[in-house]
Image (cartoon, grey):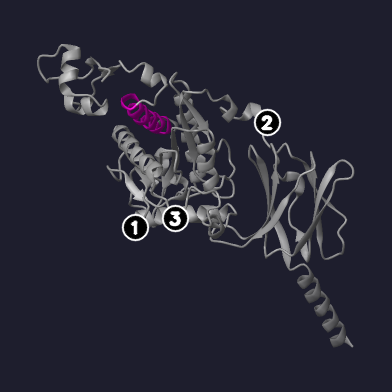
């Protein structure tokens, strides 16, 4: 009899464990300007169903997790979304399940889907809620605030939300560092009367790679600059670099790692690249190299060279010429683009530098100055750069008349005549007037 009793107890414990084989271990809420993402982290793949209750307020999205127990206090989940009033539990449909209720501010057509485990996250259930999620006062310059013919720079802070990017030896997330540099760059640009900046990602949330280029096209940006921090499999590599689009796969290891990292970014963010590459939007298709794309690529390359010239002054450069890779974030056919790797976050010394506000500001100013240098010598029609074509240049260390003439698309003879120079000798700090042609 005692053996039978022990067997029954064992079977009950075994059944109880099997009934709750899964557990909700964490809940994360990521509000973005146009949507909110809610992520349930689980110990195993979710078995779930859901329904909505929109007949009366509060509007509710109800998710039933089968064979699952709740392993956290929902009152401690941080929620800054305007779309979500509360996340709570309710009476489950049976003792082995957990019912989660998301109280909503409006009737929302939710997209609910699972994501399989990867090298950074375990099993997840994701709920995407479309709609304005962040108060306007907390946003930077919006698309509807952009002026007609200021030179417009779309700034893309890499990664975000579920996708941390590379992680430094001290635990620094790339997504946090590049957002700070991007915001500093936007601030500097917006203080320039001839330019304006638009932040594609203004907080800690994820934006799909193709959506980043689409946003740049929608605002008719003159340039898309994507800001990142590099990483390698060993801590030795260091230095910044600037990447531009190649229509072929990269032919070096760093380029291949960058391409793989970008694909991982969309996997972490919940986007199936196999679907994305179907290219229903139309700007990444078989006829990639047309006249428009060719112009965007050559312009991006020229700008990248200007940015490298300025970054050399404040940072060690891993590469001193623009590098090429096949990156989805650079594939707009209408907008010149570049990807700036601000340093190796996998290098302990550069991780520490990238956390420094002073270094972040120096990098932002160097990127800004390089961009400005390009538009000064090749101003778009109708902009202040074109109106103020007769500008001045302050000579810097290492500059010659030939270098300055090339930068402003003029000649040494025109420079000398304009400034009444009898020789080619220049001194640091000397002011030169730049001729209009």
Q: Quadrant of residue 380?
A: top left
Q: Which residue is mark 3?
A: 286
Q: Quadrant of the C terminus?
A: top left
Tell which tag, 2 or 3, sits nearer the viewer.
3
Residue 309, placed above or below residue 123: above
Q: Which residues are magenta?
A: 359-378
Viewer-proximal residue among 323 and 175? 323
Is-magenta flag for residue 360? yes
For label 2, the SS is loop
Q: Is residue 6 left or right of residue 374?
A: right
Q: Quadrant of the N terminus?
A: bottom right
For label 3, the SS is loop
For label 1, the SS is helix
Residue 207, placed above or below residue 375: below
Q: Where residue 188 appears, x then y in whole percent?
A: 45, 25
Closer to the chain start, of discs 1 and 2, is: 2
Marks 2/3: CA–CA distance: 41 Å
């Amino acid at each position: 009899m005692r053996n039978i009793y022990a067997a029954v107890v064992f079977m009950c414990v075994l059944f109880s464990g099997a009934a709750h084989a899964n557990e909700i271990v964490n809940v994360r809420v990521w509000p973005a300007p146009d949507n909110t993402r809610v992520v349930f982290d689980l110990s195993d793949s979710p078995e779930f169903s859901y329904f909505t209750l929109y007949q009366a307020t509060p509007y509710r999205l109800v998710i039933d997790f089968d064979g699952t127990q709740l392993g956290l206090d929902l009152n401690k989940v941080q929620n800054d979304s305007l779309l979500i009033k509360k996340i709570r539990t309710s009476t489950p449909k049976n003792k082995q399940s957990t019912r989660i209720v998301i109280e909503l501010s409006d009737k929302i057509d939710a997209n609910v889907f699972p994501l399989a485990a990867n090298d950074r996250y375990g099993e997840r259930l994701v709920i995407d809620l479309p709609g304005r999620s962040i108060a306007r006062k907390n946003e930077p310059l919006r698309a509807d605030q952009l002026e007609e013919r200021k030179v417009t720079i779309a700034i893309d802070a890499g990664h975000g939300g579920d996708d941390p990017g590379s992680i430094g030896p001290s635990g620094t997330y790339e997504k946090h560092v590049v957002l700070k540099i991007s915001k500093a760059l936007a601030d500097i640009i917006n203080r320039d009367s001839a330019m304006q900046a638009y932040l594609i990602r203004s907080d800690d949330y994820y934006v799909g790679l193709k959506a980043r280029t689409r946003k740049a096209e929608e605002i008719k940006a003159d340039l898309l600059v994507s800001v990142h921090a590099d990483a390698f499999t060993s801590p030795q590599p260091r230095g910044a670099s600037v990447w531009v689009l190649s229509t072929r796969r990269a032919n070096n290891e760093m380029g291949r790692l960058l391409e793989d990292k970008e694909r991982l970014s969309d996997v972490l963010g919940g986007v199936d690249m196999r679907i994305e590459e179907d290219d229903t939007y139309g700007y990444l298709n078989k006829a990639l190299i047309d006249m428009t794309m060719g112009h965007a690529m050559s312009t991006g390359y020229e700008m990248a060279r200007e940015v490298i010239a300025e970054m050399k002054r404040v940072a060690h450069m891993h590469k001193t010429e623009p590098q090429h890779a096949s990156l989805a974030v650079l594939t707009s056919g209408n907008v010149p683009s570049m990807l700036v790797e601000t340093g190796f976050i996998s290098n302990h010394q550069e991780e520490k530098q990238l956390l420094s506000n002073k270094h972040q500001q120096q990098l932002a100013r160097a990127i800004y100055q390089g961009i400005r240098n390009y538009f000064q010598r090749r101003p778009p029609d109708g902009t202040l750069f074109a109106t103020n074509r007769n500008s001045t240049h302050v000579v810097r260390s290492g500059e010659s008349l030939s270098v300055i003439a090339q930068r402003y698309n003029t000649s040494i003879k025109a420079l000398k005549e304009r400034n009444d120079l009898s020789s080619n000798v220049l001194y640091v700090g000397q002011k030169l007037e730049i001729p209009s042609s």
